Image: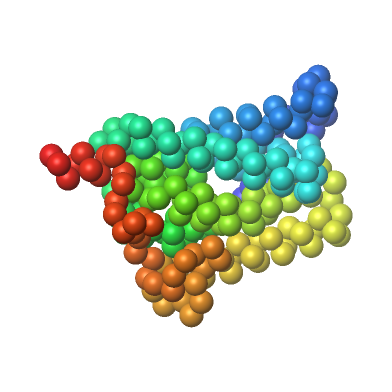
């Protein structure tokens, strides 16, 4: 939080508000779509989440940020499915091996952990999940549950910077506490040592993944196996 406050530089609140006011009622839609576009790229989503808190407050900013980031994550997932493992591996560059090792056999728990852990960028997980055979259900469910506290914690930073107050401060502290707890829980689930399954997870297992029919249906994986 201290790092974000000292390093993230955004246009002034007045300038951002004036730009969005030009769109009238469509400002909410414009922000969510812009957030989705950012989530498709390596641009840090932190910038958009903090801006959402500054512009719309915790409640509206949180909803818009979650909708926007999920649209972008879903889009990136399908781009990766269409491009295949080989192309995505080149796009990920130095992230490819790490993301592949974590996701290929990690399933729900791996996506959850990589999504909720503070400081990790979203885009390698989005593209990696599509390329390395994570099912759509696992990806969307784990991403949604894990991103909610993270997005709220970032939105709360923006809201607090724009209008410091006790209530927003409490939301900020609680949301970051939830992020830390879920990160620890996700790590234990990934290692197979958690006492309880992660929210949204179907099993108590060690995080290993199979599809609903037990088979890997990723086109890139099938192509690799045939090769």
Give the residue at the far front of this rendering: 213
Of all residues shown, which one is farthest toward the bottom? 195
Which of the 4 image quadrants contains residue 17?
A: top right
Q: Work out whether residue 144 or residue 49 is closer to the camera in this orientation and state it.
A: 144
Give coordinates of residue 151: x percent, y percent.
Answer: 64, 50
Position of residue 106 relative to residue 38, above or below, is: below
The colour scheme is rainbow
Percent position of residue 27, x then y: 76, 28
Asked whether residue 49 is in view, the answer is: no
Residue at 53% across / 54% down in the picture? 141
Q: Is 102 on the left-hand or right-hand side of 38?
A: left
- Residue placed at 47% from the left, 60% from the top? 113
Total numbered circles: 0
User: Along the horizontal axis of the image, is 225 left or right of 185?
Assistant: left
- Quadrant of the drawing holding the C terminus: top left
Q: Residue placed at 63% from the left, 30% from the top?
A: 33
Which image quadrant is residue 55 in? top right
Across and down, in percent, residue 209 comes to 35, 60
Residue 120 drawn at (x, y percent): 48, 50
Q: Is residue 168 visible?
A: yes
* Residue at 38% in and 36% down: 80
Comparing 103 with 48, the one in front is 103
Q: Please say if 44 is above or below 206.
A: above
């Amino acid at each position: 939080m201290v790092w974000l406050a000292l390093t993230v530089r955004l246009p002034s609140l007045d300038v951002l508000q004036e730009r969005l006011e030009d769109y009238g009622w469509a400002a909410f839609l414009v922000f969510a779509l812009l957030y989705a576009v950012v989530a498709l790229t390596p641009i840090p989503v932190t910038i958009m989440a903090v801006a959402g808190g500054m512009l719309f407050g915790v409640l509206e900013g949180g909803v818009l940020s979650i909708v926007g980031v999920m649209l972008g994550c879903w889009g990136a997932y399908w781009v990766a499915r269409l491009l295949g493992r080989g192309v995505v591996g080149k796009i990920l560059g130095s992230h490819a091996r790490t993301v592949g090792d974590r996701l290929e056999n990690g399933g729900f728990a791996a996506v959850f952990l990589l999504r909720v852990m503070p400081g990790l960028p979203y885009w390698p997980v989005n593209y990696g999940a599509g390329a390395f055979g994570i099912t759509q259900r696992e990806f969307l469910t784990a991403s949604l549950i894990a991103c909610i506290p993270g997005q709220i914690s970032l939105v709360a930073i923006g809201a607090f910077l724009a209008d410091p107050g006790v209530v927003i401060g409490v939301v900020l502290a609680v949301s970051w506490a939830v992020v830390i707890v879920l990160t620890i829980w996700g790590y234990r689930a990934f290692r197979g040592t958690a006492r309880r399954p992660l929210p949204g997870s179907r099993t108590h297992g060690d995080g290993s993944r199979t599809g609903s029919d037990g088979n890997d249906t990723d086109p890139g994986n099938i192509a690799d196996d045939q090769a």
